[in-house]
Amino acid sequence: MNLERIIAVRTSKTIYKDGNKVIKVFDSSYKKADVLNEALNQARVEETSLDIPNIISVTKTEDKWAIVSEYIKGKTLATLMEENSKEIDDYLNLFVDLQMKMHEIKPPLLNKLKDKMDREIEATDLSATTRYELRMRLESMPRQNQLCHGDFVPSNIIITKDSKPYIIDWSHVANGNILADVAKTYLLFTTNNEVETAQKYIDIYCAKTNTDRLAIRKWLPLVAASLSVKSKNPIKELLLSLIDDANLK
């Protein structure tokens, strides 16, 4: 493996390009079970109708685990939105259409989003009372078994030269309620200082799906709590403020 060309750096992992392959190298502290679980989940999504990079192998380089996938040539949707700001509405329509297509899928044998969020809420440094109220709200939310990406943002969509969209980075994938996934996308836009884009996204999504905004709003404190666990200030403070402002009773 050639680990000379870095194309992205994420928390606890570095991503390299080697010819027609992408190599995601995890830090040595990353557990083998977590790496294998991520690879397994992506392999299961490969079996659906979605266009995603195929996993080639799971291996080790020195003392670090790595996932090798096929390289998809193109530009991220985030880059296209930056380069063509006048067309942002068109790109957001494409973005929502792709998310809706993904949410129609019921893949087998993925982790449950509700269980994942419950663990994350319990791991916050919120008061015991607030954690209890959040977990009770989570328990009362409508149950679904749809494919949720968990990090669905324009930077995780690659558009090829023939305009074919590929969804990448399936490390947070789970089965669950699609509105939790929508709420997370909204918060990821917001915490990236893209408040106007976040609002346009919600407007388009609700119009296309005939979804009541209140149904999405109910998920915001739950998603904010789960996101806050690995967030740092000032983003963490923003997420916690959403929990403080919510009526959890």
Image (tube, rainbow, N blue to C red):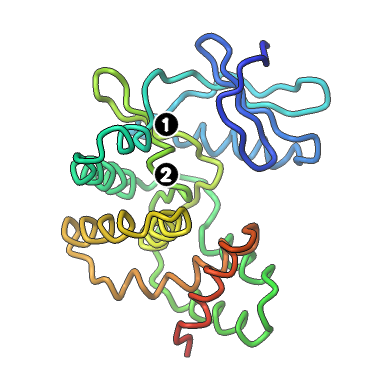
Query: What's the amino acid at mark 2?
Result: Pro
For label 2, the crowd category at 10 Å Cα-Cα, with few meaning under 14, some 14 to 19 and many 20 or more, is some
Q: Which residue is label 2 attached to? A: 107
Which label sits on residue 47?
1
Q: Is residue 223 above or below residue 189?
A: below
Q: Quadrant of the N terminus?
A: top right
Measured as percent of width and height from the top left, residue 5 is found at 61, 16
Measured as percent of width and height from the top left, residue 208 is found at 17, 55
Query: What's the amino acid at mark 1?
Result: Glu
Which label sits on residue 132?
none
Q: Secondary structure at mark 1?
A: loop
Measured as percent of width and height from the top left, residue 134 is found at 54, 79
Q: Is residue 224 left or right of residue 178?
A: right
Query: What residue sits 69% from the left and 68% below the top?
Result: 123
Q: How many marks?
A: 2
Q: Are marks 2 and 1 in contact (CB under 8 Å)?
A: yes
